[in-house]
Image (tube, rainbow, N blue to C red):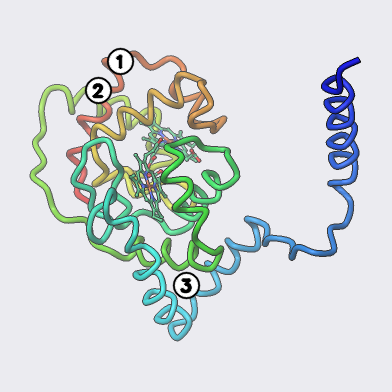
Amino acid sequence: MSLIPFSSLAGLLFFTTIAAAAPSRDAEKPIPPTPEALHSKLAQISQNPAMLSTALKDGQKAASVCRHCHGAGGNSLLPEIPNLASQNAAYLLEQMNKFVQGKRKSSEFMTGMIKALTPDERINAALYLSRQPIINRLVVSSAQSATGKQMYDKVCINCHGVSGTGSDKIPRLAGQQIKYIEDSLKRYRSGSGERVDARMAGYTRNLSDADIQNLAAYLSTLRP
Ligand code: HEC
Ligand code: HEC
Protein backbone atom coordinates (compact mmCIF):
# COMPACT_ATOMS: atom_id res chain seq x y z
CA MET A 1 0.00 0.00 0.00
CA SER A 2 1.33 3.41 -0.90
CA LEU A 3 1.67 6.12 1.68
CA ILE A 4 -0.19 8.73 -0.32
CA PRO A 5 -3.76 7.76 0.56
CA PHE A 6 -2.77 7.50 4.20
CA SER A 7 -1.06 10.89 4.30
CA SER A 8 -3.92 12.60 2.50
CA LEU A 9 -6.34 11.00 4.95
CA ALA A 10 -4.16 12.22 7.78
CA GLY A 11 -4.08 15.67 6.17
CA LEU A 12 -7.83 15.68 5.85
CA LEU A 13 -8.25 14.69 9.48
CA PHE A 14 -5.78 17.37 10.47
CA PHE A 15 -7.66 20.10 8.60
CA THR A 16 -11.02 18.86 9.81
CA THR A 17 -9.75 19.08 13.37
CA ILE A 18 -8.39 22.60 12.76
CA ALA A 19 -11.63 23.68 11.09
CA ALA A 20 -13.68 22.30 13.97
CA ALA A 21 -11.43 24.04 16.48
CA ALA A 22 -11.27 27.36 14.62
CA PRO A 23 -14.46 29.02 15.90
CA SER A 24 -13.44 28.56 19.53
CA ARG A 25 -11.64 31.25 21.52
CA ASP A 26 -8.25 31.98 19.99
CA ALA A 27 -6.12 33.18 22.85
CA GLU A 28 -3.05 34.15 20.80
CA LYS A 29 -4.26 36.64 18.19
CA PRO A 30 -5.98 39.88 19.16
CA ILE A 31 -9.49 39.89 17.70
CA PRO A 32 -9.58 42.35 14.77
CA PRO A 33 -12.01 45.23 15.33
CA THR A 34 -15.42 44.71 13.74
CA PRO A 35 -16.46 46.96 10.81
CA GLU A 36 -19.02 48.56 13.18
CA ALA A 37 -16.25 49.47 15.63
CA LEU A 38 -14.18 50.99 12.79
CA HIS A 39 -17.16 53.05 11.63
CA SER A 40 -17.83 54.44 15.11
CA LYS A 41 -14.16 55.33 15.41
CA LEU A 42 -14.29 57.18 12.08
CA ALA A 43 -17.39 59.09 13.23
CA GLN A 44 -15.73 59.93 16.55
CA ILE A 45 -12.55 61.27 14.89
CA SER A 46 -14.60 63.33 12.39
CA GLN A 47 -16.18 65.22 15.29
CA ASN A 48 -12.96 65.94 17.17
CA PRO A 49 -10.77 68.63 15.51
CA ALA A 50 -7.55 67.62 17.32
CA MET A 51 -7.93 63.91 16.51
CA LEU A 52 -8.93 64.78 12.96
CA SER A 53 -5.86 66.86 12.29
CA THR A 54 -3.57 63.99 13.36
CA ALA A 55 -5.64 61.47 11.38
CA LEU A 56 -5.45 63.56 8.20
CA LYS A 57 -1.65 63.70 8.39
CA ASP A 58 -1.40 59.95 8.94
CA GLY A 59 -4.00 59.35 6.22
CA GLN A 60 -2.01 61.34 3.67
CA LYS A 61 0.99 59.12 4.39
CA ALA A 62 -1.03 55.90 4.29
CA ALA A 63 -2.72 56.87 1.01
CA SER A 64 0.51 57.85 -0.74
CA VAL A 65 0.96 54.29 -2.10
CA CYS A 66 -2.50 54.50 -3.71
CA ARG A 67 -1.44 57.48 -5.85
CA HIS A 68 0.05 55.27 -8.56
CA CYS A 69 -3.42 54.24 -9.62
CA HIS A 70 -5.87 56.64 -7.94
CA GLY A 71 -3.83 59.77 -8.74
CA ALA A 72 -2.50 62.59 -6.57
CA GLY A 73 -5.06 63.47 -3.88
CA GLY A 74 -7.33 60.70 -5.18
CA ASN A 75 -7.89 62.30 -8.61
CA SER A 76 -7.54 59.37 -10.99
CA LEU A 77 -6.20 59.96 -14.47
CA LEU A 78 -7.41 56.62 -15.80
CA PRO A 79 -11.04 56.18 -16.91
CA GLU A 80 -11.50 52.74 -15.34
CA ILE A 81 -9.97 53.69 -11.99
CA PRO A 82 -12.26 55.56 -9.60
CA ASN A 83 -11.60 58.95 -8.07
CA LEU A 84 -11.36 58.66 -4.32
CA ALA A 85 -11.14 62.44 -3.80
CA SER A 86 -14.25 63.90 -2.10
CA GLN A 87 -15.83 60.45 -1.79
CA ASN A 88 -17.79 59.99 1.46
CA ALA A 89 -15.40 58.76 4.16
CA ALA A 90 -17.75 56.10 5.56
CA TYR A 91 -18.27 54.70 2.06
CA LEU A 92 -14.50 54.57 1.40
CA LEU A 93 -13.95 52.74 4.68
CA GLU A 94 -16.78 50.31 3.98
CA GLN A 95 -15.41 49.47 0.53
CA MET A 96 -11.88 48.93 1.90
CA ASN A 97 -13.37 46.56 4.48
CA LYS A 98 -15.27 44.78 1.70
CA PHE A 99 -12.04 44.22 -0.29
CA VAL A 100 -10.29 42.95 2.84
CA GLN A 101 -13.16 40.56 3.65
CA GLY A 102 -13.43 39.32 0.05
CA LYS A 103 -16.92 40.79 -0.29
CA ARG A 104 -15.76 42.92 -3.20
CA LYS A 105 -13.35 41.58 -5.81
CA SER A 106 -10.61 43.51 -7.58
CA SER A 107 -7.00 42.90 -8.54
CA GLU A 108 -5.04 40.89 -5.97
CA PHE A 109 -2.54 43.69 -6.07
CA MET A 110 -4.89 46.37 -4.83
CA THR A 111 -6.54 44.11 -2.29
CA GLY A 112 -3.04 43.31 -0.99
CA MET A 113 -2.22 47.00 -0.67
CA ILE A 114 -5.37 47.67 1.34
CA LYS A 115 -4.70 44.61 3.51
CA ALA A 116 -1.23 46.03 4.23
CA LEU A 117 -2.85 49.03 5.93
CA THR A 118 -3.71 48.73 9.61
CA PRO A 119 -7.38 49.34 10.51
CA ASP A 120 -6.42 52.82 11.81
CA GLU A 121 -4.58 53.63 8.58
CA ARG A 122 -7.70 52.64 6.64
CA ILE A 123 -9.81 55.03 8.71
CA ASN A 124 -7.26 57.82 8.33
CA ALA A 125 -6.81 57.28 4.57
CA ALA A 126 -10.62 57.39 4.15
CA LEU A 127 -10.79 60.66 6.11
CA TYR A 128 -7.91 62.18 4.14
CA LEU A 129 -9.21 61.20 0.70
CA SER A 130 -12.76 62.36 1.50
CA ARG A 131 -11.39 65.83 2.16
CA GLN A 132 -9.44 66.22 -1.12
CA PRO A 133 -11.06 68.37 -3.81
CA ILE A 134 -12.00 66.87 -7.15
CA ILE A 135 -10.14 68.67 -9.88
CA ASN A 136 -12.73 70.34 -12.05
CA ARG A 137 -13.38 68.87 -15.45
CA LEU A 138 -15.33 70.17 -18.39
CA VAL A 139 -18.88 68.84 -18.35
CA VAL A 140 -21.12 68.84 -21.41
CA SER A 141 -24.87 68.17 -21.56
CA SER A 142 -26.27 66.19 -24.48
CA ALA A 143 -29.46 64.46 -25.60
CA GLN A 144 -28.05 61.33 -23.94
CA SER A 145 -27.56 63.06 -20.59
CA ALA A 146 -31.11 64.50 -20.76
CA THR A 147 -32.53 60.97 -21.15
CA GLY A 148 -30.27 59.78 -18.34
CA LYS A 149 -31.54 62.54 -16.05
CA GLN A 150 -35.14 61.38 -16.45
CA MET A 151 -34.20 57.90 -15.30
CA TYR A 152 -31.92 59.15 -12.50
CA ASP A 153 -34.68 61.40 -11.13
CA LYS A 154 -37.11 58.49 -11.10
CA VAL A 155 -34.92 55.64 -9.86
CA CYS A 156 -31.66 56.79 -8.27
CA ILE A 157 -32.27 60.21 -6.71
CA ASN A 158 -33.77 58.89 -3.45
CA CYS A 159 -30.48 57.37 -2.41
CA HIS A 160 -27.74 59.18 -4.35
CA GLY A 161 -29.36 62.63 -3.95
CA VAL A 162 -30.32 65.57 -6.17
CA SER A 163 -26.71 66.57 -6.73
CA GLY A 164 -25.32 63.01 -6.77
CA THR A 165 -23.38 63.50 -3.55
CA GLY A 166 -24.77 60.45 -1.72
CA SER A 167 -24.18 60.41 2.04
CA ASP A 168 -22.44 58.27 4.62
CA LYS A 169 -22.20 54.74 3.08
CA ILE A 170 -24.00 55.72 -0.13
CA PRO A 171 -21.35 56.80 -2.63
CA ARG A 172 -21.00 60.18 -4.26
CA LEU A 173 -21.43 59.80 -8.02
CA ALA A 174 -20.91 63.45 -9.00
CA GLY A 175 -17.34 63.92 -10.22
CA GLN A 176 -16.72 60.18 -10.60
CA GLN A 177 -15.00 58.75 -13.70
CA ILE A 178 -17.71 58.06 -16.27
CA LYS A 179 -16.22 54.80 -17.57
CA TYR A 180 -15.86 53.53 -14.00
CA ILE A 181 -19.54 54.32 -13.35
CA GLU A 182 -20.56 52.31 -16.41
CA ASP A 183 -18.31 49.40 -15.41
CA SER A 184 -19.67 49.44 -11.84
CA LEU A 185 -23.31 49.37 -12.97
CA LYS A 186 -22.51 46.39 -15.22
CA ARG A 187 -20.74 44.61 -12.35
CA TYR A 188 -23.80 44.91 -10.10
CA ARG A 189 -26.07 43.88 -12.98
CA SER A 190 -24.05 40.80 -13.94
CA GLY A 191 -24.40 39.14 -10.54
CA SER A 192 -20.86 37.75 -11.05
CA GLY A 193 -19.92 38.47 -7.43
CA GLU A 194 -17.41 41.21 -8.27
CA ARG A 195 -19.74 43.67 -6.57
CA VAL A 196 -22.48 42.50 -4.33
CA ASP A 197 -25.16 44.78 -2.93
CA ALA A 198 -28.80 43.75 -2.82
CA ARG A 199 -30.05 47.28 -3.47
CA MET A 200 -27.83 47.98 -6.48
CA ALA A 201 -28.47 44.49 -7.85
CA GLY A 202 -32.19 45.26 -7.78
CA TYR A 203 -31.83 48.69 -9.37
CA THR A 204 -29.53 47.55 -12.21
CA ARG A 205 -31.20 44.21 -13.08
CA ASN A 206 -33.42 45.68 -15.79
CA LEU A 207 -31.07 48.35 -17.15
CA SER A 208 -30.01 48.02 -20.80
CA ASP A 209 -26.52 49.01 -21.95
CA ALA A 210 -28.10 52.15 -23.46
CA ASP A 211 -29.72 53.04 -20.09
CA ILE A 212 -26.32 52.67 -18.44
CA GLN A 213 -24.67 54.95 -21.01
CA ASN A 214 -27.41 57.56 -20.58
CA LEU A 215 -27.15 57.48 -16.78
CA ALA A 216 -23.36 57.80 -16.94
CA ALA A 217 -23.67 60.69 -19.43
CA TYR A 218 -26.02 62.47 -17.01
CA LEU A 219 -23.83 61.80 -13.97
CA SER A 220 -20.83 63.28 -15.77
CA THR A 221 -22.73 66.61 -16.01
CA LEU A 222 -23.08 66.91 -12.21
CA ARG A 223 -20.64 69.35 -10.66
CA PRO A 224 -18.25 67.63 -8.26
C1 HEC B 1 -2.92 48.81 -9.20
C2 HEC B 1 -3.81 49.94 -9.18
C3 HEC B 1 -4.43 50.30 -7.86
C4 HEC B 1 -3.79 50.63 -6.67
C5 HEC B 1 -2.30 50.72 -6.40
C6 HEC B 1 -4.83 50.95 -5.72
N1 HEC B 1 -6.07 50.81 -6.31
FE1 HEC B 1 -7.87 51.10 -5.43
N2 HEC B 1 -8.84 50.59 -7.14
C7 HEC B 1 -8.22 50.21 -8.32
C8 HEC B 1 -9.25 49.82 -9.28
C9 HEC B 1 -9.00 49.35 -10.71
C10 HEC B 1 -10.51 49.97 -8.63
C11 HEC B 1 -11.89 49.64 -9.18
C12 HEC B 1 -12.06 48.17 -8.92
C13 HEC B 1 -13.42 47.61 -9.09
O1 HEC B 1 -14.44 48.29 -8.97
O2 HEC B 1 -13.45 46.39 -9.31
C14 HEC B 1 -10.21 50.47 -7.29
C15 HEC B 1 -11.18 50.75 -6.34
C16 HEC B 1 -10.93 51.26 -5.08
C17 HEC B 1 -11.94 51.66 -4.12
C18 HEC B 1 -13.44 51.67 -4.35
C19 HEC B 1 -13.87 53.04 -4.84
C20 HEC B 1 -15.35 53.17 -5.11
O3 HEC B 1 -15.76 54.24 -5.59
O4 HEC B 1 -16.09 52.23 -4.84
C21 HEC B 1 -11.30 52.06 -2.99
C22 HEC B 1 -11.94 52.57 -1.71
C23 HEC B 1 -9.88 51.92 -3.24
N3 HEC B 1 -9.68 51.44 -4.51
C24 HEC B 1 -8.90 52.24 -2.32
C25 HEC B 1 -7.53 52.09 -2.55
C26 HEC B 1 -6.52 52.41 -1.56
C27 HEC B 1 -6.82 52.94 -0.16
C28 HEC B 1 -5.31 52.14 -2.15
C29 HEC B 1 -3.95 52.28 -1.52
C30 HEC B 1 -3.74 51.59 -0.28
C31 HEC B 1 -5.57 51.66 -3.49
N4 HEC B 1 -6.93 51.65 -3.71
C32 HEC B 1 -4.59 51.31 -4.40
C33 HEC B 1 -6.86 50.20 -8.55
C34 HEC B 1 -5.87 50.42 -7.62
C1 HEC C 1 -31.82 52.11 -2.27
C2 HEC C 1 -30.72 53.04 -2.45
C3 HEC C 1 -30.06 53.11 -3.82
C4 HEC C 1 -30.66 53.34 -5.04
C5 HEC C 1 -32.14 53.58 -5.34
C6 HEC C 1 -29.58 53.38 -6.02
N1 HEC C 1 -28.38 53.18 -5.39
FE1 HEC C 1 -26.56 53.15 -6.30
N2 HEC C 1 -25.68 52.59 -4.55
C7 HEC C 1 -26.33 52.45 -3.33
C8 HEC C 1 -25.41 51.88 -2.36
C9 HEC C 1 -25.72 51.59 -0.90
C10 HEC C 1 -24.18 51.69 -3.04
C11 HEC C 1 -22.88 51.03 -2.48
C12 HEC C 1 -23.08 49.53 -2.56
C13 HEC C 1 -21.82 48.71 -2.36
O1 HEC C 1 -21.38 48.57 -1.23
O2 HEC C 1 -21.28 48.21 -3.36
C14 HEC C 1 -24.39 52.15 -4.41
C15 HEC C 1 -23.41 52.15 -5.40
C16 HEC C 1 -23.56 52.69 -6.65
C17 HEC C 1 -22.48 52.86 -7.62
C18 HEC C 1 -21.01 52.53 -7.41
C19 HEC C 1 -20.25 53.79 -7.08
C20 HEC C 1 -18.78 53.61 -6.82
O3 HEC C 1 -18.11 54.60 -6.45
O4 HEC C 1 -18.28 52.50 -6.97
C21 HEC C 1 -23.04 53.44 -8.74
C22 HEC C 1 -22.33 53.82 -10.02
C23 HEC C 1 -24.45 53.63 -8.46
N3 HEC C 1 -24.73 53.17 -7.18
C24 HEC C 1 -25.35 54.19 -9.34
C25 HEC C 1 -26.74 54.15 -9.16
C26 HEC C 1 -27.69 54.47 -10.20
C27 HEC C 1 -27.33 54.98 -11.58
C28 HEC C 1 -28.95 54.26 -9.66
C29 HEC C 1 -30.28 54.36 -10.37
C30 HEC C 1 -30.43 53.49 -11.53
C31 HEC C 1 -28.74 53.85 -8.28
N4 HEC C 1 -27.40 53.78 -8.02
C32 HEC C 1 -29.77 53.58 -7.37
C33 HEC C 1 -27.66 52.77 -3.08
C34 HEC C 1 -28.62 53.00 -4.06
Within 10 Å of disc 3 (Cα), the crowding (few <14, some 14-19, many 20+) is some
**Farthest residue toward the bottom?**
50
Query: Residue at label 2?
Result: 213
Circles 1, 2 touching at the beta carbon (< 8 Å)? yes
Q: Secondary structure at mark 2?
A: helix
Residue drawn at (89%, 45%) of the image? 21
**Farthest residue toward the front?**
1
Q: Earlier in the sequence, mark 3 or mark 2?
A: 3
Q: Amino acid at mark 2?
A: Gln
Query: Residue at label 3?
Result: 46
152 or 185, which is in the foreground?
Answer: 185
Residue 126 in percent (x, y) is at 42, 61
224 or 104, which is in the foreground?
Answer: 104
Residue drawn at (51%, 21%) of the image? 192
Instruction: Work out whether 23 lies above or below 194.
Output: below
Query: Residue at label 1?
Result: 209
Determine the CA span between mark 3 and mark 2. 36 Å
Determine the CA span between mark 3 and mark 1. 39 Å
